[in-house]
Every structure is written in C-alpha cells, then in structure tokens.
Amino acid sequence: MILRSGAGTAGPDESLLFTNHLFTGSVMPQVQLHVRLLEMSQHPVALIYAACRQCYSARFAGDLFDENEQNPQKQAEFIRKVVASGHESPLEHVTFTFAIEGVSRALTHQLVRHRIASFSQQSQRYVKETDFGYVVPPSIEQDEVSRAEFVRTMEMIQSSYHALLEAFKEKGKVGEQANQDVRFVLPQAAETKIVVTMNTRELIHFFHQRCCRRAQWEIKRLAEEMLKICRDKLPEVFADVAAKCDALGYCPEGENLSCGRRPLKEQALEKRVKGQT
Ligand SMILES: Cc1cc2nc3c(=O)[nH]c(=O)nc-3n(C[C@H](O)[C@H](O)[C@H](O)COP(=O)(O)OP(=O)(O)OC[C@H]3O[C@@H](n4cnc5c(N)ncnc54)[C@H](O)[C@@H]3O)c2cc1C
C-alpha cells in the first residue's frame, strides 16, 4: 500500500484512491503499483526470427524479416524453439520500455542492480518531496499498532523535511541546492517513479530471479505485473517464462532458502538417475 505524507494539506488528486488514515483520522490518498508499457519493438517476432536465421543463413536478414508477412506462424514456431533451446542472443534485439510508479525506493534500489537495463528515475534533487508518498509493507499494513507507528514515523520525517527546507531557505538555499541535502532524511518507503527499458533476454533473467518466491514481495509484485504485460504482447517468448525453478525443473537456492515448491538440485538429479522423471 502507498500513502502520501501530509495528505491533510495536499491538494486533491483524482488519479489517487483515498482511504482512511488510521493515525490522525484525516483522509490520506492511497496509490497502487502502476505499470504501463510505453513502447516495445514494433515487429518483435519478425525481428527475433531474422536475427536468429541470420546466424545460419546465406540470405540477407532484411529478406528474412519480410517473411513475417508471408508466414507469421512459421516465425512464431521458430522463435519458440529458439527460446527453448537457450539460443538467447537474438532475443536482445527486442526491447520493452515500462513506466512504473507507486513503488518504494527500497524496490528501485533492487531494480537498478539489473545492469543490462536502462533507467530514468524521478530525482529527489529536482523534485521536492514535501508531500512524499510512501509504501506500507502488507505485514505492517495488516497490524493496526504497527501501521500507526509506521505512519507516525512518516509524519515525523515529513515534518523534519519541512523544517530543514525552511532552515535552508533562511540561508538563501532553495530548489535543488536544498533538496539534494534535505532528501537524506527521506525513508526507503518513499514512493518513486521510474522508466525502465530491458531487452527480452534480460527480461527473462529478471523474471527468473524476481518471480521467485524468495524475491522480496514488492519487486516480486512488480515483476509479476511486467510479466503479465510481456505475456500478453509477446506470448511466443514469454508464455512459459516464470521463476527460474520452473525453467530449471529444480530449485537452485539450496535447502535453507528453498520454498519447497520444486525439488532441490540434488534431489532432482537423484530422481533422474533413478529414472523417475
Ligand atoms: C532473492 C534475492 C536476494 C538478493 N540478495 C542480495 C543481497 O543480499 N545483496 C546484494 O548485494 N544483492 C542481492 N541480490 C541482488 C543480486 O545479487 C543481483 O545483483 C541482482 O539480482 C541482479 O542480477 P544479475 O547480476 O544476475 O543480473 P543483471 O545485472 O540483470 O545481469 C544479467 C546477467 O548478465 C551477466 N552480467 C551482467 N554484468 C556482468 C558482469 N559485470 N560480469 C559478468 N557477467 C555479467 C550475468 O550473467 C547476469 O546474470 C539479491 C537478488 C535476489 C533475487
């Protein structure tokens, strides 16, 4: 859940949902995770097909690309086989760009660890965070006492943020000159917005890691939303993509970390040796 600090004084925003604010009794706006596909490669199937066939064909990829018009079914079948075979570099030519909002800085700190991606994130330097929104983890949301404590902390941070901005203002520092230092008091829960571009190969890797039950709940939720969009737009690649254990047929996380949904690697191997799979 995402709430906005100081919502009592914030102007109305019809794009936000409203919920009761347990701590002060005032009305707080609540926003949800929102993922929107901004752009993707225009002819993804033809592109992957042409790139892949170029590796083995004497023909020109430009002509192979045009075969899409004549036989889209053939291309779709071909790239399903390519994905299944693990010949993944042709997948790099197709990209997806997502706009993401309603997520915490804790989430984006994890997201930007994915290096084969491009990011443009809302700045806490150029954008003043006087009424910052924040994400409340479900475990805290569900417990009234914890939630009240959490909201109180957000309010305190907001109050400090305001006080520090004022102090900077008195010294003649405003805008980014103030924001860049005052942001140091903001929490990891603070809401952020980010644009992400990933190619198809990296997306598969991202989904393998972040749709896993071991992944942190917020980034898992984001990954699941992105995967839904990818499956809808490019089922030839994403129809069977899920957490890595589904691709591998076993859990590589080890005994202590495995959720138990799949056998451990050793167990899967043992089964195979005994001819059970
Ligand atoms: C459940 C979970 C827990 C985690 N816990 C922690 C943690 O406690 N601390 C922490 O720091 N991180 C943690 N991470 C983050 C993790 O270590 C990775 O940084 C992150 O998931 C990005 O994955 P990646 O490096 O495989 O992939 P990406 O950066 O998305 O790159 C994709 C692939 O490209 C290749 N690649 C990219 N860059 C290089 C390179 N420089 N050299 C060689 N190959 C490269 C690799 O094959 C890599 O898998 C966690 C991740 C998960 C899913």
Image: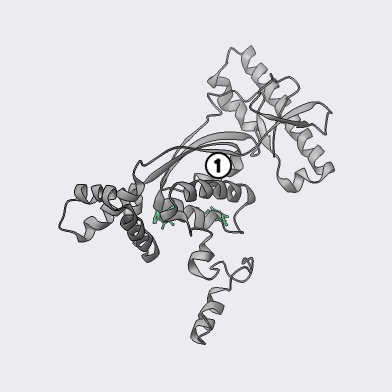
Q: Is residue 136 above or below residue 242?
A: above
Q: Answer left or right for 236 relative to 187.
A: left
Q: Answer left or right for 26 relative to 116.
A: right
**Beta carbon at label 1 within 8 Å of ligand 1:** no
Please state the horizontal and vertical placement of residue 238, each as a whole percent of the image.
Answer: 46, 54
Q: Give the residue type at disc 1.
A: Thr
Asked which secondary structure carries label 1, the reply is helix
Q: Is residue 181 above or below residue 119?
A: above
Residue at x 55% of width, y 42% of height:
108
Q: Is residue 252 above or below residue 144?
A: below
Please state the horizontal and vertical placement of residue 154, each as a whole percent of the image.
Answer: 73, 33
Q: Is residue 237 above or below residue 23?
A: below
Residue at x 79% of width, y 31% of height:
21
- Closest to the observer: 168 or 49? 49
Q: Answer left or right for 105 relative to 68.
A: right
- Closest to the observer: 192 or 98? 98
Q: Which residue is mark 1?
A: 108
Residue at x 59% of width, y 55% of height:
215
Q: Residue furthest bottom?
A: 274
Please state the horizontal and vertical placement of residue 155, each as a whole percent of the image.
Answer: 75, 29
Task: Rate crowding at label 1 as few (under 14), some (14 to 19) or many (20 or more) other CA atoms within 10 Å.
Answer: many
